Amino acid sequence: MNISQQVNFQVKTDVSDLKEVLRQFEAVKQDWVNQKDWLQCQLALAEGFTNAVRHAHKNKPSDTPIDIEISVTQEEINIRIWDYGQPFQLTSIAKKISPSSDLAGGGRGIQILQKIADELSYDHHEDDRNCLLIKKNLLP
């Protein structure tokens, strides 16, 4: 897997930083990436970032950092969003959500991420951070 483009950056816990997150994403865009795949990943990134701000960092100071890593290869787009929130089991929440679920109380974001990602995980690491991994396999 040769990385064509990669960017690592940090933003604050502020939904207004979404503009910077999307600007950084555009900086790694490759002409050969299918437009549908690109837009889906852009949506997944926006959803993952806003979930980190609104849920993971809900009671944290606005200067709490969120680290983001994006890599684009010929085969896939990988997005990692690192937060300092309370860890949760993505798989157990994802299993509770079905297409017919009443999502009035939330859960749409996870459903969106599940539909877009070919691999989706949320893991707690020893440095007290959590990593949301969104991996999208690219169409040839």
Image (cartoon, helix red, strand yellow):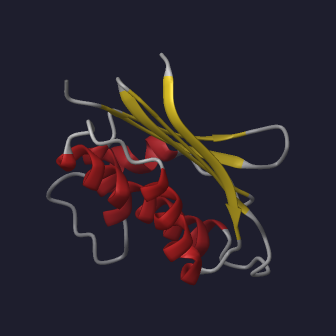
Residue at the left extreme of this rendering: 100
Residue 56 at x, y percent in the picture: 63, 65
Residue at 60% x, 46% y: name it.
7
Count up the numbered dots.
Answer: 0
* Left or right for 108, reference 5: left
* Left or right for 58, reference 20: right
Quarter assignment of residue 73: top left
Residue at the right extreme of this rendering: 127
* Left or right for 102, reference 127: left
Residue 121 at x, y percent in the picture: 50, 38
Query: Which one is nearer the viewer's eye here, 82 or 29?
Result: 29
Give the vertical position of 18 relative to 107 (above or below): below
Query: Which one is nearer the viewer's eye here, 67 or 48?
Result: 67
Residue at the top extreme of this rendering: 1
Residue 17 at x, y percent in the picture: 58, 76
Residue 50 at x, y percent in the picture: 50, 70
Residue at 68% x, 75% y: name it.
13
Would residue 93 be visible to someone looking at this image? yes
The quadrant in which the C terminus is found is: top left
Residue at 39% x, 48% y: name it.
29
Query: Which one is nearer the viewer's eye here, 15 or 1?
Result: 1
Residue at 33% x, 40% y: name it.
117
Query: Which one is nearer the viewer's eye here, 58 or 33?
Result: 33
Would residue 97 be visible to someone looking at this image? no
Give the vertical position of 13 relative to 34 (above or below): below
Give the vertical position of 46 relative to 91 (above or below): below
